[in-house]
Amino acid sequence: MTVYIFEFIGTAMLILIGNGVVANLVLKGTKGSDLGWVGISLAWGIAVFIGVFISADSSGAHLNPAVTIGLATAGKFSWSLVPGYIVAQILGAMMGNVLVWLNYKKQYDQTEDTAAILATFSTGPAIRNPIWNLISETIGTFVLVFAIFFIAGGSFGEEAISLGALNALPVALLVVGIGFGLGGATGYAINPARDFGPRLLHAILPIKNKGTSDWSYAWIPIIGPILGAILAALLYISLS
């Protein structure tokens, strides 16, 4: 159970800081309304650093079903552990966003913009087009997972790999780079748990003026990252 517990904790910390900065930016009555895209990208990188550093030595710090599936596809992680990791990641993402909601409860109460409220839970496209939004999420996650193979693995072979604590900073910088370079099209979920868990929580929580949870878009930040991770794993295998 230790690996699942630390996947839960690491993912919760990831979402607490990551979606916390979104809340600080878009909710009414905060002191962070001028953070902008640079602030979001940097904060998500810091969020990844914290989550990875906490959980790396215990669970390998996947914190993302796409990473878990990508590693398993490449033979670097046991498929028997995949379901438990994904459940822990989704529940951790929900817990992290509960903490965001509690931290900014008074700001949520004052915010009337339903789109802004949803943005503190889940991602959405700048220009809605399912095919191109799917491609964007696929590309972003491909970069994430393909780079992780080399950051965490260091060499080809069949041995299992994981994100040790020393890899926290490189992976954080990787996520910052993805945010700067590729994130503007969809808000770069690049993580099914990061989007699905908080979106489900948005549907459940008694938030004033919350509007809909936009389930018609929800499949894109699930399928896109999984496709990107599998493509990254297949390329990695072909190079080994």
Image (tube, rainbow, N blue to C red):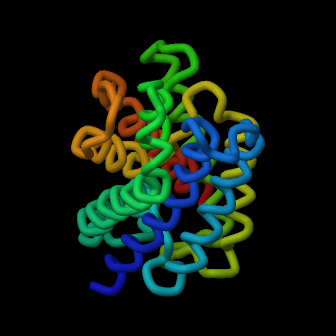
Question: Looking at the image, which residue is at 30% across and 22% down?
Answer: 216
Q: Is residue 172 above or below residue 106?
A: below
Q: Picture quarter containing residue 32?
A: top right
Numbered label tally:
0
Residue shown at the point (63%, 53%) measured from the top left:
44
- Left or right of 13? Residue 80 is left
Image quadrant occupied by the N terminus:
bottom left
Quadrant position of the C terminus in the picture: bottom right
Q: Position of residue 172 (x, y in %)?
A: 69, 61
Q: Which quadrant of the structure image shows residue 47?
A: bottom right
What residue appears at the point 32 percent right and 49 percent down from the top-left corner? 197
Question: Image point 47% across, 36% down: which residue?
Answer: 110
Along the line of sight, the residue nearer the viewer: 170 or 179: 179
Is residue 69 in view from this perspective? no
On the image, the x and y values in percent for residue 3 come to 36, 81
Query: How far across and down, in percent of the image, does residue 235 sit?
Result: 56, 47
The answer to whether residue 45 is visible is yes
Taking 20 as reference, is 117 above or below it? above
Image coords of residue 94 (percent x, y): 34, 56
Residue 85 is left or right of residue 146, and the answer is left
Of 80 and 235, the residue lying toward us: 80
Which quarter of the figure has residue 185?
top right
**Left or right: residue 35 compared with residue 207:** right
Residue 20 vs residue 126, the one in the foreground: 20
